């Protein structure tokens, strides 16, 4: 669940920023005036399950619906800077090392059913995410260091979170016990209407999960119907900004990749998204059919066990990584080689890094050192036989075989199981996709105290720089520290970034313009689904 959190923060070209400003701009009590008739459009998606509440939406189709119905307090611009949307989030350092966040919502905002949006709805959403019975995509939200949150989560008798305090109808404060600049992202939730869930109380999250009362959010569109195959949205009468379309229908095609985007080519849909690969985009045609590309926030990496493999052996193994031909065959020009790891909150790796940090010379140096090393190692992956993960590992097998190292490959049913095996030192390396979200800043991955440190690294410099991340004094400071962190990660040779991929959105230009925000929203929801 943690890794799905990516949609929790920003989106494509930067992951939850893709829930576009236009769609999530909020609502107004004043109904829209009569406008010229606008187009209705159809979005082809891989799967709809009816879970359109954003805190439960998992499939790309469900996430697309949720992104059009619900809004966050703030979005991100193209430079990854936060932009106020339904409200704002600010912080200040207080005495006793406490951090006070002030959360506000704008006045005169309304949900699509006409109910006023107030700070009580935000507080309700915080409490719901903290509920021990909540098992949705943000189920690790309770790990935030909010004063009183641990007690609320662990003790059924505790009914309040002491660190969350209502100030007035449009303001609340949230007190954190430690400095963590990422806390603002954790507070930047999709806002749910408290009034819709009057029967809910702590321990009864299933009531919200199973409730179908129209999926009421605060955005440019309102839920209309779902028949098991098609979800229909209509322009909200309370939208603050004029919706682009009067009606949007999302259709469950049961298709992915090239088969999905063909729905646009053959005129059955107006827009569809897919990870951009050579095979998926090989048969796109049509006079009005265009394709827009968006960098994914996430990227593929190989991770190396710090317990099983020595630092010098890890550097030697990374120095042998040469997957350019595999990437070209699979992605063509639709991917980027990144030579340092990435951080979704700070955008790209440093542009001046245009060459691999390690080369094949590392292997020669390693052999000269005379260090004893494992000549049989095991790698894990979770993709299918036709995935890029499997293709990269197959190439790695050939590269290492030439050096006398036998690489065994094991497929896992889940990423959680694969990481668990690495923690237990049963596999030496693994390849996985890093989604934007919970572990995007690398603290949880590479700090000795990080709860997702499956590589088992405990390095003094890494510990220091990851801790500094959380105490950054602002966004500029965060960027500077992040660049230092990525260099430290490579020095420790625990992660090798393989590539950053793109999402392709194929659309009917006769109905949808190249500047349409819906392109970004559809691309973001499709990322690595």
Image (tube, grey):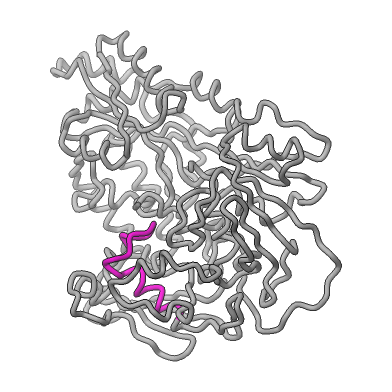
Q: Which quadrant holds residue 295?
A: top right
**Of the pair 58 and 75, the residue shown nearer to us:** 58
**Of the pair 155 and 468, the residue shown nearer to us:** 155
Could you say where residue 300 lies in the image, as x and y percent from the top left? 42, 36
| Residue 122 is covered by the magenta coloring | yes
| Residue 316 is covered by the magenta coloring | no
Could you say where residue 214 lies in the image, as x and y percent from the top left? 55, 69
Q: Is residue 42 above or below residue 262?
A: below
Q: Residue at x 76, y 40 (%)?
A: 267
From which residue to which does the magenta span run? 121-140
Could you say where residue 182 lies in the image, as x and y percent from the top left? 37, 63
Q: Which quadrant holds residue 408?
A: top left
**Of the pair 25 and 463, the residue shown nearer to us:** 25
**Of the pair 486 and 412, the residue shown nearer to us:** 412
Q: Residue furthest front?
A: 227
Q: Is residue 15 left or right of residue 522?
A: left
Q: Residue at x 28, y 10 (%)?
A: 403
Q: Is residue 46 above or below residue 389?
A: below
């Amino acid at each position: 669940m943690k890794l799905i959190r990516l949609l929790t923060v920003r989106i494509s070209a930067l992951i939850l920023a893709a829930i576009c400003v236009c769609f999530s701009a909020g609502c107004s009590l004043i109904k829209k005036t009569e406008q010229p008739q606008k187009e209705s459009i159809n979005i082809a998606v891989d799967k709809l399950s009816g879970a359109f509440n954003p805190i439960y939406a998992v499939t790309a189709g469900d996430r697309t619906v949720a992104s059009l119905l619900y809004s966050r307090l703030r979005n991100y611009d193209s430079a990854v800077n936060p932009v106020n949307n339904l409200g704002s989030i600010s912080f200040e350092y207080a005495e006793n090392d406490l951090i006070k966040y002030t959360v506000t919502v704008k006045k005169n905002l309304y949900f699509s059913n006409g109910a006023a949006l107030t700070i009580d709805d935000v507080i309700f959403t915080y409490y719901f995410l903290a509920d021990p019975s909540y098992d949705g995509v943000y189920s690790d939200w309770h790990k935030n260091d909010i004063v009183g949150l641990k007690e609320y989560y662990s003790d059924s008798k505790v009914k309040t979170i002491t660190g969350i305090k209502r100030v007035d109808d449009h303001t609340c404060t949230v007190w954190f016990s430690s400095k963590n600049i990422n806390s603002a992202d954790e507070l930047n939730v999709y806002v749910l209407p408290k009034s819709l869930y009057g029967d809910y109380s702590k321990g009864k999250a299933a009531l919200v999960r199973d409730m179908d009362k129209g999926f009421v959010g605060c955005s440019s569109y309102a839920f209309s119907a779902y028949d098991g195959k098609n979800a229909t949205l209509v322009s909200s009468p309370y939208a603050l900004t004029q919706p682009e379309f009067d009606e949007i229908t999302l259709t469950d095609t049961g298709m992915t990749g090239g088969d999905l985007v063909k729905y646009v080519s053959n005129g059955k849909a107006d827009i569809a998204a897919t990870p951009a690969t050579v095979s998926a985009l090989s048969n796109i045609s049509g006079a009005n059919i265009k394709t827009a590309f968006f960098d994914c926030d996430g990227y593929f990496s190989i991770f190396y066990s710090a317990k099983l493999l020595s630092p010098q052996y890890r550097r030697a193994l990374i120095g042998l990584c040469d997957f350019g031909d595999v990437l070209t065959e699979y992605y063509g020009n639709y991917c980027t080689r990144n030579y340092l790891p990435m951080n979704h909150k700070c955008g790209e790796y440093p542009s001046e890094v245009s060459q691999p940090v390690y080369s094949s010379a590392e292997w020669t140096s390693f052999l000269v050192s005379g260090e004893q090393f494992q000549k049989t190692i095991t790698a894990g992956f979770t993709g299918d036989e036709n995935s890029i993960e499997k293709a990269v590992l197959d190439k790695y097998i050939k590269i290492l075989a030439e050096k006398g190292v036998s690489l065994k490959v094991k497929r896992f049913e889940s990423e959680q199981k694969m990481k668990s095996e690495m923690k237990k030192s049963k596999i030496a390396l693994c390849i996985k996709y890093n989604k934007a979200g919970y572990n995007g800043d690398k603290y949880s991955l590479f700090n000795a105290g990080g709860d997702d440190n499956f590589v088992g690294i405990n390095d003094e410099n890494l510990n220091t720089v990851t801790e500094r991340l959380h105490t950054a004094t602002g966004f500029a400071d965060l960027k500077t520290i992040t660049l230092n962190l990525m260099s430290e990660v490579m020095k420790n040779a625990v992660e090798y970034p393989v590539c950053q991929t793109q999402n392709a959105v194929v659309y009917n230009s006769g109905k949808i313009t190249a500047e349409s925000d819906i392109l970004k929203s559809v691309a973001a929801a499709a990322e690595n689904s």
